[in-house]
Image (tube, rainbow, N blue to C red):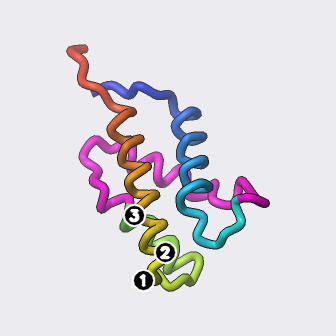
Amino acid sequence: MKKTIDDRQLMNTVQKILNRDWDPIEVAEVLNDEYDAYCAPITQILDDIQATEQHLSNYLEEVEREEMSLNTYSEQNLRRRATTTQSLWKLHISTHTLTNT
């Protein structure tokens, strides 16, 4: 497997996804760097070829619960987390390609 995207581009894309799809405390319009601390751990998950969508969802839920003290089971948070997980999973798939090298 070979990555088709460099690390900086991946981090930027993760940041955009978190701000656009997740934004659990609804501040992304004002503070576009609010979720930057979560980009590196998410990038590590995305770099793991054995990662699953559930790994991504679990990480987001843990952040919501442990670091933000949010109700992780509210309909809005469940919907945001699902949308974000789908976007991140598409990114995971698009960043890896089969090669013979």
* Left or right side of 43 for 18: right
Q: Position of residue 26 (x, y in %)?
A: 67, 69
At 64% from the left edge and 72% from the top edge, which residue is drawn?
A: 25
Amino acid carrying label 2: it is Asn
Q: Position of residue 68 (x, y in %)?
A: 59, 77
Amino acid carrying label 1: it is Tyr
* Left or right side of 55 for 43: right
Q: Is mark 2 in CB contact (under 8 Å) with mark 3?
A: no
Residue underneath mark 2: 77
Residue underneath mark 3: 82
- Secondary element at image label 3: helix
Location of residue 85 (image quadrant): bottom left
Number of residues whose C-alpha sits closer than 10 Å to that of mark 3, classed few (under 14), some (14–19) or many (20 or more): some
* Left or right side of 34 for 78: left
- Secondary element at image label 1: loop
Residue underneath mark 1: 73
Amino acid carrying label 3: it is Ala
> Which region of the structure is painted magenta?
29-56
* Left or right side of 27 for 60: left
Q: Is residue 28 above or below residue 95?
A: below
- Quadrant location of the N terminus in the rendered image: top left
